[in-house]
Amino acid sequence: MRSSDHNHTLILILSPYFGGFHPECFCSCTRPCPAVMFNTAMSGNHTDQQMSALEQTRTSLCDQFASISGSDSAVAQCYLAENEWDMERALNSFFEAHMDSVFDAEDAEETKDVSGKKRKGVNTSDTAEASGTKKKLKTDCIDLTAEEPTCSSSVDPQESQAGSVVTESNAEDSKLSIISWNVDGLDTLSLAERARGLCSYLALYTPDVVFLQELIPSYIQYLKKRAVSYLFVEGSDDGYFTGIMLKKSRVKLLESEIICYPTTQMLRNLLVAQVTFSGQKLYLMTSHLESCKNQSEERMKQLRVVFQTMKEAPEDATVIFAGDTNLRDTEVVKVGGLPPGVCDVWEQLGKQEHCRYTWDTKANSNKTVPYISRCRFDRIFLRSAKTGPRVTPDHMVLVGMEKLDCGRYTSDHWGIYCTFKT
């Protein structure tokens, strides 16, 4: 509160003390009235308590805003005050002001580069051919519009044993492949380059389904322009949110829904997409559970919603949840463990050490923190259909562990690439 506000409040409190009619004791005098002094003092104490509670509430809102947006308390207070201390409005205002320009600049630079190459007559095919031997992941803008050729069509029966190769390719084609990744869209540093890095991984792995967390509107618009072979299902259209990408040629969307977490303080929800893949019914789910150690109770509430939704899915459907859970193992134990029929895919595949830690400040330098933290925040849960063909985990590996040309990683989280036998 400003000092002028204190003075104004003080004048209002003290004005009944001196002279005039005193309704509290029905007297009229020129001296301070004891009844007024007592009542005013009590009112003042009540006002102080109200102001203290208001200050605590707004301080908490500032802390939450700063945590979500990656800003500081001063920025948080500015945006919250301008938006009447409404968290959602303030966050939307922040993102709109800070994010759109990032990708606008990127698009402008791309246009400049393309026109420059045309003027100079650069032969892009020669350039690509010359650099084809390099193993380093390229961060150029990737065209994901073309469907990859089927494995069987690329086989020359005169040069290989056609039968065995086609059988193997058919087996691979029947596998469901997914990527789950918190892309850290709230971090504006090198955001366009990191988004291009994500496109590179999508082109490299060509997953059937992509589960994304911490998207922002400008980031997903960037992806939509470059990953046109995918259908996008979004958990929101403002602030920051989750999304699911479905490969149009292999996964068919039936319907989707957003399940709210009633007590979330961080705009979190559960996104569900009902799809078919190779004739099988799948329920695909993603979420970004409440962040930070001190939000354990809320995070466990949200986990219960996830597990309950998985259990309630039809028996003829396979359910796959993939997302940034922010979970500690003790929290899974506290909610009663995994429901019957639900497995943790990493555990099911033997708890392989090479893909244990998805948030690792020891290996990932995107976040500058004064401590080392290695956590398995990003997880995949599977509930196979109780009737019909069973879906089983096949393979898991972490992705995004190569630095981009900008000197940063695609995200502060590693992504998870996982395949399933169907």
Image (cartoon, rainbow, N blue to C red):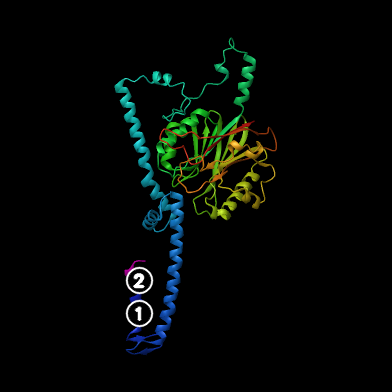
Task: Please give the label number shown on residue 14.
Answer: 1
341 relative position to 64: left or right: right
Spot occupied by residue 119 in the image (x, y as percentages of width and height): 29, 22
Give the residue displayed 67% in from the left and 51% down from the top: 336
Residue placed furthest toward the top: 158
Main SS category, magenta section: helix
Foreground pick, 22 / 366: 366
Look at the image and tell me in which quarter the N terminus lies.
bottom left
The picture places residue 171, in percent across and down from the top left corner, at: 63, 24
Residue 53 on the magenta segment: no
Indicate the position of residue 161 as horizontal and vertical percent values: 63, 13
- Amino acid type at circle 2 is His
Badge 1 element: helix
Residue 45: quadrant of the picture? bottom left
Against 34, residue 336 (above or below) is above
Q: Which mark is residue 103?
A: none
Magenta-colored span: 1-7
Left of 113 or right of it: where is 392? right
Tell me if residue 5 is in the magenta stretch: yes
Of the numbered discs in the image, which one, if any, rests on residue 6? 2
The crowd level at tag 2 (other Cα within 10 Å; few <14, some 14-19, many 20+) is few
Q: Is residue 32 left or right of residue 227?
A: left
Front residue (pair 60, 255): 60
Q: CA distance from mark 2 to mark 1?
A: 12 Å
Image height of 126 relative to 256, above or below: above
Asked if one can make out residue 24 in the rendered structure from this viewpoint, the answer is no
Where residue 278 appears, x then y in whole percent? 61, 29
Q: Earlier in the sequence, mark 2 or mark 1?
A: 2
Going 63% across and 47% down the picture, which residue do you hit? 307
User: Label 1 sits on what residue type?
Assistant: Leu
